[in-house]
Amino acid sequence: MKKIILLAIIGLGILSCTTQKTTKTMDLPSEWKRTTNIYEVNVRQYTKEATFRAFEKEMPRLKEMGVKTLWFMPITPIAQKNKKGTLGSQYAAQDYTAINPEFGTMEDFKHLVNEAHKMGFKVIIDWVANHTGWDHVWTKTNPDFYLKDPKTNDFQIASGMDDIIELDYKNPAMRNAMIEAMKFWVREANIDGFRCDLASWVEVDFWQEARPKVETLKPLFWLGEFDELDNPEYGKVFDASYIWTWMHKTKDFNEGKISLADLKNILMRYSAIGDHSMRAWFTSNHDENTWNGTEYEKYGIFAKPLAVFSVTWNGVPLIYNGQELPLKTKRLEFFEKDPIPWTGKNELHDFYKTLLNLKSNNSALRGGDPAVTTYLLKTSADDKILAYLRKNGKDEVLTVLNMSKEAVTFKLNDEHLNGSFKNVFEKTSRDFSQDKGFVMKAGDYLVFEK
């Protein structure tokens, strides 16, 4: 059996953790999934027009930035009964097999997917399987598809969200209808996968049933909104999952509530899951930006180092639209029209371009690949520095992050690091066989390619 070896500095010693490979119920991700990245598109807020056709004009810029996979937030019509705000939530579907008229027509969406494919993009769409809006077509045609509230004898409201109602996954007919609705988008629009909203709120056996049935049409990419640390059984179905624990704990770290050693321990827990699935690393998404703050509000000086981490650690990086601006303090409205304030000058375009191209082109950064070994490196400042080396044959990528709010002078005291590397941002060369010393500013980051 192949193994992944991770060397971590925990306390006073070196911890060597070996994780055994587990067998996935589905085939391993196809090759494009190992080198891809995901860019989340909020069509409502992306342009002033808020249409598919208007978004198409932005795709050349995103291709130039290195984006590979476009994830579209829900594109289905929005339920009007009990809706939130003026426009309602995109996650309160009115019909699983129709297009939100705000965004255009079905032909517009098909055109977008076709053009995206011509440009080399993959396209995945948000799939909201746990619940629908109050006036979804099924509430009239198949009311038995829903759970009922015994107190009101009406549809059961989803936990904490009174604009949506929950489906009954004990009903085989409903499950079949859901699977057919998913197949509709693969068959009609030729999409490449799904981002499954609140995936762990739906019984895992539904996903185990749905994936092979939908994939009779074509292989797909499945990103689930769940943390595999909490829901390991879902990781046997999905190609990638969320990193809620990491996301919340890095915020705690910025606020001084936990140490860097605590963060390294969390990384060890994620790494111990193995390569049968991937983690999707991010610093922002539609929920976080609106409800909890931008990456700069949550992480402060560590926003960019954590973005570097998201691309260079094992997994798949996820970027929310507008982060390339960046949206330092701008929280996009959820239920109203609130366009991204594009200026024509995206400050972080080249930052992301450098990282995303490195991810796509260097085999040491392949996600979920057992041929890649990740080493957490020893330094003379382990309480302040996060340094790791990823290797795949002759390919190596070194990442060094100053996770402190002060300048740090230190050395990388690790036998795994040797030879000449190039700084991917500054294009300068350095021979680590001769000198492993560093001086880094507060919140600084370095990425080297061998």
Image (spheres, rainbow, N blue to C red):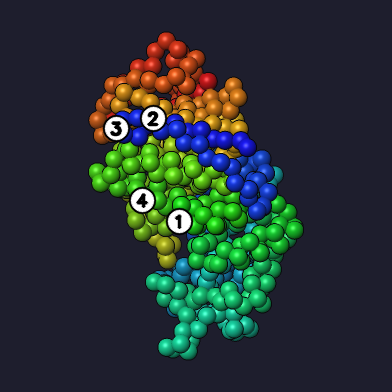
What residue is disc 1 on?
A: 230
Residue 287, how many percent across, how many down? 42, 58
What residue is disc 3 on?
A: 383
User: Residue shown at 35%/17% (left/top)?
Assistant: 437
What residue is disc 4 on?
A: 248
Foreground pick, 100 / 390: 390
User: Element under label 3?
Assistant: loop
**Left or right position of 299 against 48:** left
Sequence-wise first label, 3 or 4? 4
User: In the rendered view, would you say 190 is above or below 83?
Assistant: above
What residue is disc 2 on?
A: 14
Q: Nearer the viewer, mark 4 or mark 2?
A: 2
What kind of residue is marked 1? Asp
User: Element under label 1?
Assistant: loop
User: Element under label 4?
Assistant: helix
In contact (CB < 8 Å): disc 4 and disc 1: no
